[in-house]
Amino acid sequence: MPLACNFLALFWWAAYTVVAVWAQKVIPGVDFLAPGLVLSMQEEAGYRTVWLAVLWILLQEGMGNLPFGYGIAWYGLLVIFYIVGAGFRGRSFCSCACSVSARCAASAAHIWFVGLGQLAAPQPAVLVEGALQALLFPLVWAVADWLFPTKLRQDVTPF
């Protein structure tokens, strides 16, 4: 990849990260970084996705008040469901549906982790966060996909 594309990718993902972290402050309990991870897996198979995942897991672990390992499980489920959905083609509705399913499963894991961490969170609020995550995930993914620079798009397999 040419140097100009590397700088464009660095700038785009840095901007995405800043906006996603800000959005998480505005709507607490919703992960805006996860749709970016799916987009990265779709567009940039390889090392960049791994670095983004590591960075975002560390951000999630640092920003949250749940026990360590929550972000790893959260993104691990997303990757597993993405790999399953990749069999339907990387950009199809079924792939996105698998990602939403992953978010629903991760939302269920959220409830489990809250209990595991012995945090006093009201169950209705946790359920609302899970529902918001499942509803907003495809929308955030679609907007990020639309804004993703054409120069960075690659026609590659998921991994």
Image (tube, rainbow, N blue to C red):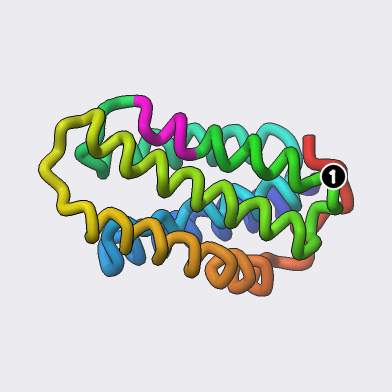
The quadrant in which the C terminus is found is top right
Instruction: Name the residue rendered at 48%, 68% in the picture.
Output: 136
Q: Is residue 90 magenta?
A: no
Instruction: Name the residue rendered at 76%, 58% in the picture.
Output: 94
Q: On the image, which quarter does residue 66 sit in?
A: top left
Instruction: Name the residue rendered at 30%, 66% in the picture.
Output: 27
Span colored in magenta? 69-74
Instruction: Name the residue rendered at 43%, 60% in the picture.
Output: 133
- Vertical side of 110 occupied by 135: above or below: below
Q: Which residue is mark 1?
A: 87
The quadrant in which the N terminus is found is top right
Residue 69 lies left or right of residue 40; in this view the side is left
Q: Main secondary structure of the magenta part?
A: helix
Residue 22 lies left or right of residue 35; in this view the side is left
- Vertical side of 75 occupied by 154: above or below: below
Type of amino acid under label 1: Gly
Q: Position of residue 120 (x, y in %)?
A: 11, 43
Q: On the image, which quarter does residue 144 sit in?
A: bottom right
- Vertical side of 81 occupied by 140: above or below: below
Q: Position of residue 147 (x, y in %)?
A: 64, 72
Residue 81 lies left or right of residue 25; in this view the side is right
Q: Position of residue 95 (x, y in %)?
A: 74, 55
